[in-house]
Image (tube, helix red, strand yellow):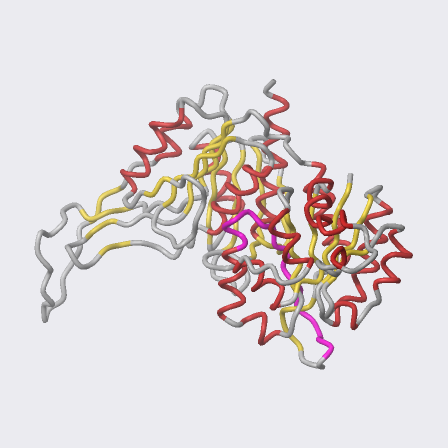
Amino acid sequence: MKIALGVSGGIACYKAAEILRRLQDRGFDVAVVMTKGAAQFVTPLTFRALSGNKVYMDIFEGASAGSDPASAYDHIFLAQSIDLFLIAPATADCIAKMAAGIADDFLTTFHLAVQSPVVVAPAMNTRMWEHASVQANLRTLQSRGVHIVQPEIGRMACNTYGPGRLAPVNVIVDYAAGLLSRNQDLQGRRVLVTAGPTVEDIDPVRFLSNRSSGKMGFAIAQAARTRGAEVTLISGPTDLEFPGVVRVRSTEEMRQAVVERFSQTDVLIKAAAPLDFRPKTVASQKIKKAKGGSSLDLEPTPDILQELGARKDGKVLVGFAAETEDLAKNARAKLKAKNLDLIVVNPVGGPDSGFASDTNRASIIDADGAVQDIPLMSKSQMAEAILDRVTALLGKNK
């Protein structure tokens, strides 16, 4: 299999040579695509000597006198020949151009021609990494199916400390290799995913909801789609995008949408966080502030997973449990009560996992009670770990 390794101009460029070597050790043919900025740190000759392949950097190379005219289409021909495009390191500038669809050098022009999976490993100063525009660009790329290998926390070349340092070489290589080994293993399967919160109205102005961002569910939907599944994503209110996403608001609306599609699915992954309670009555007018305070009568909302677990009919059911205490005990009780095959339990309240975060840590518990601990990683990486367990269960059910 062939990988195009994109290298953009940052101090972490020197690690790209090691990434190239590690990919070759896994048996991949690697072609390097560089920006002119990257060539200021590591010469194209280095990558050509290591890869044994042409290094691509100048989109206009074929326009010069005496050159091969066919090279003017290198970005098209190379894009047709690769199985994966990995950009490591990816600078803030490179990420911004990819998100905006700018094509002003070989790497960004090549990106627009690529139809294989794309993996981005960002590397930049902490202040740049945390800038709102960088985070918005990353969300844009993720919504289009680009896989992000989150940078690590560490000391920077500028002698500062924080998140933004290129992920370890072995993590990047493992992710790229794993993505290719999983490629299309859900082909022909129908996967139904739920994501985000639900909303229950109190009056025309106020409502109840929770802190779920939907990021985990959207990451699972995208990963399943990349692996060949026919994916239906049902989401509560979020600002995330996915092709054909079914938007709902209340828990009952989510229930109806899931039940309607359940019989036509092979796998249901309930990553949403529907509310457990709703107001017994919804006021038709705005409730006025009272001096003595006021109370709100609540009633339980439908338990979607329990309803479907009672009639699963050989389907694979995966639930989630966000817990603040007794994680394993509470998750096992939920798994048993709802007749699930797997439950993913994660602690909430930490700065780097749970609601709104781009990273997560969790444990996957199966119907036999066995526990697989998942260390801190990006939600896109965790999505792959969850789907690995799902595909194993589908194999057993054949």
Q: Check the image and report above or below for 68 versus 166.
A: above
Residue lying at the far front of the rendered structure: 65
Residue at image point 51% right, 28% down: 316
Q: Nearer the viewer, residue 274 or 242?
A: 242
Residue 133 point in image, percent of width and height: 50, 68
Q: Is residue 287 above or below residue 52?
A: below
The answer to whether residue 275 is left or right of residue 363 is left
The magenta span reads 141-157
Residue 105 in the image: x percent, y percent? 66, 62
Instruction: Report whether 228 appears left or right of 340.
Output: right
Residue 380 part of the magenta-drawn span = no
- Above-or-below relation of 203 to 136: above
Task: Give percent across and percent down for residue 146.
Answer: 58, 50
Question: Residue sitting at 14 percent across and 66 percent down?
Answer: 293
Looking at the rendering, in which quadrant would you find the C terminus? top right
Q: Name the outermost residue toward the bottom.
A: 159
Image quadrant in which the N terminus is located:
top right
Give x and y (percent) for residue 164.
64, 69
